[in-house]
Image: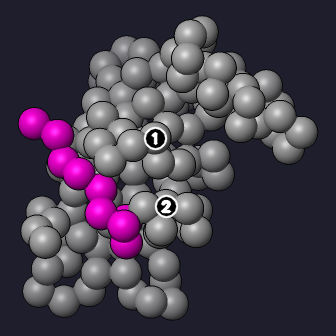
Amino acid sequence: MMAKLNQAMKDMIAGELSYISTVDADGNPDVGPKISMRVLDDEHLIYNEMTGGQTQANINDNGKAIVAVANAKALKGFRFGGTAKLYTDGPYYDQAAKWAEGKFPVPKGAGVITIEKIWTLDPGPKAGKIFEE
């Protein structure tokens, strides 16, 4: 089941630094910033895998990923959970390479995350709950 991004979520992803969390085969978590995180469409995020490190290894191993983004001043945020896949060629990779031109290194891959669940990170009674319109 896929979850859909609304305009507030898209705007936050475009305007704030996102962090991706993955897990290895032994259950060890990894988290890191992804300055290239952006919206692919209403149900997918895309980012440029620039280091080819632990995040890439974890995604290749099991495909589990969560992306968190927040605006600290506004006390608003979202967490997007789903399945990630890395592409080293084809249209997703070509799009990632074009996005990086002139500002970032050539990507080692394009990570595409299919969003299956969305949680709110706003403080209060809805904190950490599945997002509902």
Q: Is residue 109 left or right of residue 87?
A: right
Q: Say which quadrant the C terminus sits in.
A: bottom left
Q: Quadrant of residue 30?
A: top left
Image location (x, y in percent) of residue 75: 39, 87
* Quadrant of the rendering where the N terminus is positioned: top left
Q: Which residue is mark 2?
A: 13
Image: magenta residue range? 1-9
Say if 33 sits above or below 62 in the image. below
Q: What's the colour scheme?
A: one colour
Report the magenta stretch's main SS.
loop
Report the front residue among 97 and 36. Answer: 97
Using the image as rendered, state which of residue 110 and residue 57 is in the foreground.
110
Mark drawn on residue 91: none
> Which of 101/119 is in front?
101
Q: Badge 1, how many Cα within 10 Å: few under 14, some, many 20+? A: some
Using the image, determine if residue 70 lies above or below residue 93: below
When the figure is inspected, residue 15 is found, relative to residue 43, above or below; the finding is below
Where disc 2 sits, the SS reads helix
Q: Residues within 10 Å of mark 2 (few under 14, many from 20)?
A: many
Can you give x and y, in whole percent of width and height, for residue 103 in the image?
A: 85, 44
User: Is 82 on the left or on the right of 89, as rendered?
Assistant: left
Q: Which residue is mark 1?
A: 40
